[in-house]
Amino acid sequence: DGGITQSPKYLFRKEGQNVTLSCEQNLNHDAMYWYRQDPGQGLRLIYYSQIVNDFQKGDIAEGYSVSREKKESFPLTVTSAQKNPTAFYLCATAGGNRAGNQPQHFGDGTRLSIL
Amino acid sequence: RKEVEQDPGPFNVPEGATVAFNCTYSNSASQSFFWYRQDCRKEPKLLMSVYSSGNEDGRFTAQLNRASQYISLLIRDSKLSDSATYLCVVNRGGGFKTIFGAGTRLFVKA
């Protein structure tokens, strides 16, 4: 999606390693989200942030961590505690006065696999 | 019971057919509703928002039934390019959390 950049596109993690997925946006949106999608499954919410320096756990936050130090950036760290990290990770943003009621727009995702 | 449920399909239809998808949600406080389409191994893309009075965008019509807590998507005159997974999305009661349905797979055949 225009204005949302996720990197890298593909990532491989070794056992016991932490890896960080990048999400940058230039849409000036307040809200940012991280989702995980497993093959043939829907999206599951990992973390979300309504505003800088604030974030909340989603439905499957265990084994993940985030930070929101800048409005433009919402990196996701997949820690070694996440035992099954292989998935498609999607970052999304939403903006406007009532961002919670606005549609989300997605980056083109990062595919993470275990070596 | 899942918060948002969709028929997983797949729906196999010929070109030119009309196809309808339904999606039910359990949180009566939900305020915002959307349909997304997702192509294989790609990110979801917004197809349309769903308004209380129903809304149309070309061949696509979305309806909301708050009393029965479901939304629907109607695709008329199906094209081969409509083949994708269609995701129903519901906002959790005005907050920032949204719930995605698992999606309905559509195959349009020539």
Image (spheres, coloured by chain):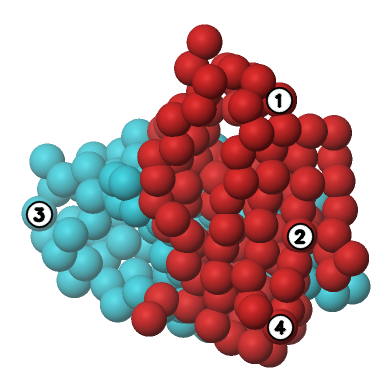
Chain colours: A cyan, B red
Residue B51 is situated, as x and y percent measured from the top left of the image, at 84, 64
| Dot 4: element | loop
Residue type beneath disc 4: Ala
**Which quadrant holds residue A78?**
bottom left
Label disc, if present, on residue B77 of the rendered structure: 1
Label disc, if present, on residue A15 of the rendered structure: 3
Q: CA distance from mark 4 to mark 2?
A: 12 Å
Instruction: Of the two numbered discs 4 and 1 on the same chain, state the one appearing first in sequence.
Output: 4
Residues marked 4 and 3, same chain: no
Q: Compared to B41, does A65 lie above or below?
A: below
Q: Chain of mark 4?
A: B
| Dot 1: element | loop
Residue A25 is situated, as x and y percent measured from the top left of the image, at 69, 49
Q: Chain of mark 3?
A: A
Q: Chain of mark 1?
A: B
Q: CA distance from mark 4 to mark 1?
A: 29 Å
Which residue position holds label 4?
A: B67
Q: Compared to A98, does B58 lie above or below?
A: above
Instruction: Of the two numbered discs 1 and 2 on the same chain, state the one appearing first in sequence.
Output: 2
Residues marked 2 and 3, same chain: no
Mark nearer the viewer, 4 or 3: 4
Judge from the rendering whether residue A113 lies leftward or rightward of residue A97; answer left or right: left
- Residue at coordinates 54% horizontally, 82% vertically from top-left? B26
